[in-house]
Image (cartoon, rainbow, N blue to C red):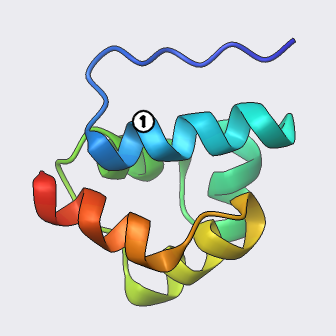
Amino acid sequence: MNRINLKNKSPLGIIVANGLLQKGKTQKYLANKMNITEGALSHILSGRYNPSINNIYIMSELLDIDIGDIMNAIRKE
């Protein structure tokens, strides 16, 4: 079973973590699909960096998360 640490996660990080858990995927898998390092993904999920439009689309498609929900989470950061 995958375990994802929610410590230091932003609103976007929590949404993505839940999506990863539901799909049984890891942050490493998502980083590879987004063509970024795991460190860069960690920065996105903690709210330090905003994802590119392309990476927002990839997260939405891979994790079945509505793009509007992703955008709302980013705005809350």
Residue under the point 77% across and 48% down: 29
Q: Is residue 14 visible?
A: yes
Q: Which residue is more in the foreground, 3 or 32?
A: 3
Q: How many marks?
A: 1
Residue under the point 12% across and 51% down: 77
At numbered mark 1, what does the secondary structure look like: helix, strand or loop?
Answer: helix
Question: In the rendering, at what x and y percent does residue 27 appear?
Answer: 64, 39
As drawn, is 56 to the left or to the right of 59?
Answer: left
Vertically, is 53 above or below 12? below
Vertically, is 65 above or below 26? below
Amino acid type for the residue under numbered disc 1: Ile
**Crowd class of label 1 (few under 14; some 14 to 19; many from 20; radius 10 Å):** some
Question: In the rendering, at what x and y percent does residue 58 appear?
Answer: 64, 76
As drawn, is 36 to the left or to the right of 6?
Answer: right
Residue under the point 28% across and 43% down: 11
Quarter of the image for residue 33 reads bottom right
Vertically, is 23 above or below 35? above
Question: In the rendering, at what x and y percent does residue 47 appear?
Answer: 21, 47
Please, which residue is most extreme toward the bottom here?
54
Q: Which residue is mark 1?
A: 14
Quarter of the image for residue 64 reads bottom right
Residue under the point 68% across and 54% down: 30
Quarter of the image for residue 74 reads bottom left
Question: In the rendering, at what x and y percent does residue 21 appear?
Answer: 73, 31
